[in-house]
Amino acid sequence: MRVTCIKWLVAGMCGLLAACAIITVNVYFPEKAVKEAYKSLDDVLLKNGAEKTPDVGKPPAAEPGATDGKPQSNLFKDLPVFSFCAVAHAAENYADDLAIELASMPEVIKAYEGMSKRLPRLTALFDSAAVGLTNQGLVTVRDKTKITAQDVELVNRENQSRKVVVTSMAKAILKITKVKESKEALAQVLGKAAATYADTRREEAKPGWWIQLANGRWIQK
């Protein structure tokens, strides 16, 4: 009887430890602000050329009690990490903060430089229905008879650049929301960052372009 009790006790402790191990941090994802930040970066660094200054968007509106001289990157310095309501209330300022944060990353600037140079040819490929836009915001070949080996390489480089932008957005979200960057936290926001990037690209797609909806279905816009 005593042995059985000990076994149950050990099993219970193991279950408790397992339950504690799977507790995760719930990262707030400001979807609207992320989409606006993507659009700001596209307007300044993609459509208008990479030679534009990375100072995108207007400075965030000052929070009550904040001083005018406070750096933008420290705008939410005094917000508690787990103050979800405070974070949600300040979400309207996240778009500018996120855009500025990404525009300060050399890898993002380099990615947009490449994307800007490829834009004319990539647009022609979309116009001819040779390629389509996936629900992760990437470019995929749909008609191999309409592309060359150089075009395939162009698509591969484009996707690499887009992955850099999306991954950098995920990292910026963690920084802006004051969540410590970890593999788990990054994985939690990376998929949403990619889906929102795809949503932004779908909205910008021209009539006749092939796009993949969030549910996986392909349609011609």
Image (cartoon, grey):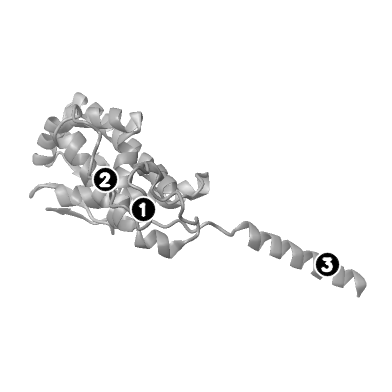
User: How crowded is the residue under tag 1: few (<14 C-alpha within 10 Å), some, or many (20+)?
Assistant: some
Q: Secondary structure at mark 3?
A: helix
Q: In percent of the image, x 38 and y 50: which residue is there? A: 191
- Which label lies toward us, 1 or 2? 2
Say the numbered circle drawn on residue 7. Answer: 3
Specify the farthest residue to the right. Answer: 2
Give the CA separation, mark 2 to mark 3: 61 Å
Is 76 positioned to the left or the right of 15 in the image?
left
- Give the total of numbered labels: 3
Is 63 positioned to the left or the right of 58 in the image?
right
Amino acid type for the residue under numbered disc 1:
Lys
Give the CA separation, mark 3 to mark 1: 43 Å
Could you say where residue 128 lies in the image, as x and y percent from the top left?
Answer: 9, 39
Say the numbered circle drawn on residue 192. Answer: 1
Q: Earlier in the sequence, mark 3 or mark 1?
A: 3
Q: In percent of the image, x 55 and y 57: which residue is there? A: 24
Q: In percent of the image, x 34 and y 55: which residue is there? A: 63
Amino acid type for the residue under numbered disc 2:
Pro
Amino acid type for the residue under numbered disc 3:
Lys
163 and 83: which is toward the camera: 83
Q: Earlier in the sequence, mark 2 or mark 3?
A: 3
Give the CA separation, mark 1 to mark 2: 25 Å
Residue at mark 2: 59
Q: Quadrant of residue 58?
A: top left
